Image (spheres, rainbow, N blue to C red):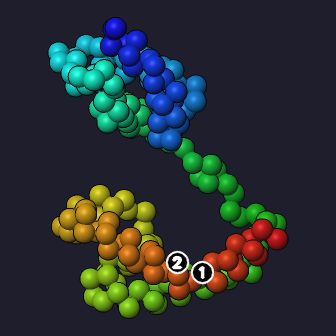
Amino acid sequence: MDIIEVLDTRRDDWSKMLTNQGCPIHLIDDFIHDTYIKLSNLDNPKRIIREDGDVNMYYVYFTLRSRVVDYHRQNKLVYVADFIDTTDTDDFDIDNEILLNNLYEGIMSEVNVFGAYGSKLCKLYLPTSLSLRQLATESGISLTSIHNSLKQYKAYIKEEFEDEYLAYKRHKKS
């Protein structure tokens, strides 16, 4: 059986992977075909097809992922929020903003519970749009350490501020 035929048996899985990675729907088939071509040109087909005849999902996943990342690098995403006119106050809800601000202020005051390391980490991560990788690069702390610490802090914050968050969500829906 040809490599492309074996890969094509899992086509639905590749489509789901690409959809979950933020690939535009109209490009999914193109990305899958590009990946098939790229993988069929490899010197060692055992990287893709295991000895038992099953597909190496991780290898294909990372190949698809690199294709999506390349696409997004070439085509910078434009967010709708960039085009919203914030000077129009008809849709502005001051109560909603107050609830959101109180929630944010409460969280930022609570991060001191995490100690010096956790407090600095949260104050760097929460108000900025830095990714964990960027934060690790800039701070010199390992990515794993940052991930594990923030995971614990987020769980604590969710537990402590659940009522305030639910109040904000309820008000936002009304």
Q: Residue at x 60, y 80 (%)?
A: 162
Q: Secondary structure at mark 1?
A: helix
Res 145 → quadrant: bottom left
Work out whether 162 lies above or below 80.
Answer: below
Q: Is residue 24 left or right of residue 95?
A: left
* Residue 105 seen by the camera: no
- Mark 2–mark 1 distance (CA, rounded to whole Å): 6 Å
Residue picked out by circle 1: 162
Q: Secondary structure at mark 2?
A: helix
Please state, as top left, top right, bottom left or bottom right, where the N terminus lies in the image.
Answer: top left
Work out whether 129 lies above or below 81.
Answer: below
Foreground residue among 50 and 8: 50
Res 139 → quadrant: bottom left
Foreground residue among 36 and 116: 36
- For the residues bearing labels 2 and 1, Cβ distance under 8 angstroms: yes
Foreground residue among 32 and 137: 32
Q: Is residue 166 left or right of residue 136?
A: right
Res 70 → quadrant: top left
Residue picked out by circle 2: 158
Q: Is residue 23 left or right of residue 115?
A: right
Please state, as top left, top right, bottom left or bottom right, where the C terminus lies in the image.
Answer: bottom right
Work out whether 45 lies above or below 89.
Answer: above
Work out whether 62 lies above or below 158.
Answer: above
* Amino acid type of the residue that numbered disc 2 sits on in the rendered structure: Lys
Q: Position of residue 161 (x, y in %)?
A: 56, 83
* Residue 157 seen by the camera: yes
Q: Residue furthest front?
A: 52
* Amino acid type of the residue that numbered disc 1 sits on in the rendered structure: Glu
Q: Residues within 10 Å of mark 1 (few under 14, many from 20)?
A: few
Q: Residue at x 58, y 25 (%)?
A: 26
Q: Position of residue 66 (x, y in %)?
A: 34, 34
Q: Position of residue 129 (x, y in %)?
A: 43, 63
